[in-house]
Structures are given as structure tokens and as C-alpha cells.
Amino acid sequence: MGLNIKPLSDRVVIEPVAAENKTASGIIIPDTAKEKPQRGKVVAVGAGTKDHKMTVKEGDMVLYGKYAGTELKLEGTDYLIMREDDILAIV
């Protein structure tokens, strides 16, 4: 099933990865204390602009800023739409 949305110019659609429920030492983190995820999978990429060629591609795992992008809920799944410049790294 493909995503039924195509971002324009230098924008990408990212599906955030779920936050960890447990710390490395085994402590369970309650929902109220969880931080917003900063890692996600690229699910759609725009065509870029004449001055900006796209670096990321569909399927890449990326790190982005904590407050980057615009939240979108589509078909029951949460996504973020942001400019490629808001992506910090490909992991």
C-alpha cells in the first residue's frame, strides 16, 4: 500500500518511529514523560527545485529537529511534512 500524497518541491513526508517504552537499564517510561521522537522513515520525497537537488530518498531513516515539520494524520497514521533542510542526518 503506497502513500497517497506527493510533497511539492523540496519537502519530504516522514513517518516518525515510535518512542522507546523502556530505558537501557529497564525502567519503564510512562506516556506523560515520553519525548517527541526525532527519528523517522522517509515515505515520500518531492522533486526538488532547480537550485536544490534532493539528497534523501524513500526508505531512508533520518534524524530531524524536535520541533521540525508540520504534523499530519492520514488514514490513521501520523506523518510529518518538512523541508529537506530540516533533516539533520541520514542514519
Image (cartoon, helix red, strand yellow):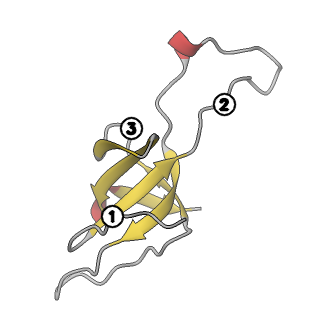
Q: Residues within 10 Å of mark 1 (few under 14, many from 20)?
A: few
Amino acid found under the numbered disc labelled 3: Lys
Q: Secondary structure at mark 1?
A: loop
In this view, the residue farthest toward the bottom is: 50
Q: Determine which residue is flagged by label 1.
A: 5
Q: Secondary structure at mark 2?
A: loop
Q: Residue at x 55, y 65 (%)?
A: 1
Please identify the quarter of the rendering in which residue 8 is found.
bottom left
Please identify the quarter of the rendering in which residue 34 is found.
top right
Residue 81 is left or right of residue 78, and the answer is: left
First in residue order: circle 1 vs circle 2: 1
First in residue order: circle 2 vs circle 3: 2
Asked if 79 appears above or below 84 in the picture, the reply is: above
Amino acid found under the numbered disc labelled 1: Ile
Label 2 to label 3: alpha-carbon separation = 15 Å
Q: Determine which residue is flagged by label 3.
A: 66
Q: Nearer the viewer, residue 48 or 51?
A: 48
Q: Name the disc covering residue 20, or none.
A: 2
Q: Nearer the viewer, residue 63 or 18?
A: 18
Q: Are marks 1 and 3 in contact (CB under 8 Å)?
A: no
Q: Secondary structure at mark 3?
A: loop
Q: Residue 78: image x %, image y %?
A: 43, 41
